Amino acid sequence: MRFLIKTEVQQPLQEKPTAARSLSRARTLWKNWELYLLILPVVVYYIIFHYVPMYGVQIAFKDFIASKGITDSPWVGLKHFERFFDSYYFERLIMNTLEIGLYELAVGFPVPILLALMINEVRSKRFKKTIQTVTYAPHFLSTVVLVGMLFIFLDPNSGMINTMIRLFGGDPVAFMTQPGWFKTIYVFSGVWQSMGWSSIIYLAALTSIDPQLHEAAKVDGASRLKRVWHINLPGIMPTIIILLIMNVGSIMAVGFEKVFLMQNDLNRDSSDVIATYVYRSGILGAQYSFSAAIGLFNSIINFILLVTVNFISKKVGQTSLW
């Protein structure tokens, strides 16, 4: 009798047909076809502009000759990677890129979180909207305009900052030409430009926190600061971890445009990063294979960082990108 019951129960589980599963998936696809149609342009965009161009990455392992094309150019193995590792600029490029990336992460990452927590605590709707408008506005400035503003504000003769320094009895500082100031100006101007826009996602996460938790905490006598610490911050922690993983994955991906615009011969020791070196060697120097090898090396480092941090986060906090 026991045997009969066991076989009756187990048989349907063992005979779950693959065809039925495929049919079920097809029905799900058909049922949600509008959603898949909605995401189709994004998928096509990524395939055309992000995956198809990867075909050209192979020139990092070749001596690219324009007349022969990518396919017929001779293979040279890791020659361009070895040349970059032995380069005089290798240490400077790696250190500058890494320092700017870590500086941005240490300063730029927590500021939007603090701003979102503070905006969330503002009770006056008008004041709240004013703060949001003021902090969001710099995001819409182009990088060229932002750097232009930096040159005007930090001008040694007529700049606002140096005028204030003189008023307090100090000597003017040539901020844009001294290597020691480059990273600080780069990072803090980026924080000013993006902190408001970056705080939007944290504000959205804060709206998902159950108000009953705050009501219960108030009844228990918790102050506003304690409610922020024990309710709001843990509530948005998964969002913080996800964005931290994404930020760590782009530590070595310091943008080219802003660095290039702020760079000059006097601050090059501090401002020369991998992106600007790739531009100089690839576009100006026509060393396409060499610059492709440097860019590929940079991308691999970022990929390794992303996977490593994602793995650690998954093991430690059960929150990860995948």
Image: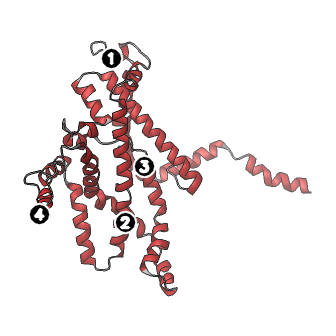
Is disc 2 in contact with disc 4, using a CB cutoff of under 8 Å?
no
Q: Nearer the viewer, residue 183 or 113?
A: 183
C-alpha distance separating marks 2 and 3: 19 Å
Helix, strand or loop status at disc 2: helix
C-alpha distance separating marks 2 and 4: 32 Å
**Nearest to N terminus: mark 3 or mark 4:** 4
Tell which residue pokes out farthest to the left in this image: 158
Q: Nearer the viewer, residue 148 or 210?
A: 148
Residue at which label 2 appears: 114
10 Å neighbourhood of mark 4: few (<14), some, or many (≥20)? few
Q: Residue at x 38, y 51 (%)?
A: 105
Is disc 3 in contact with disc 1, using a CB cutoff of under 8 Å?
no
Instruction: Tell me the mark number nearer the camera, choosing from 2 and 4.
Output: 4
Is disc 2 in contact with disc 3, using a CB cutoff of under 8 Å?
no
Residue 119 image position (x, y, % from top left) = 33, 71
**Nearest to N terminus: mark 2 or mark 4:** 2
C-alpha distance separating marks 1 and 2: 49 Å
Q: Amino acid at mark 2?
A: Leu
Residue at which label 3 appears: 246
Residue 81 image position (x, y, % from top left) = 40, 24
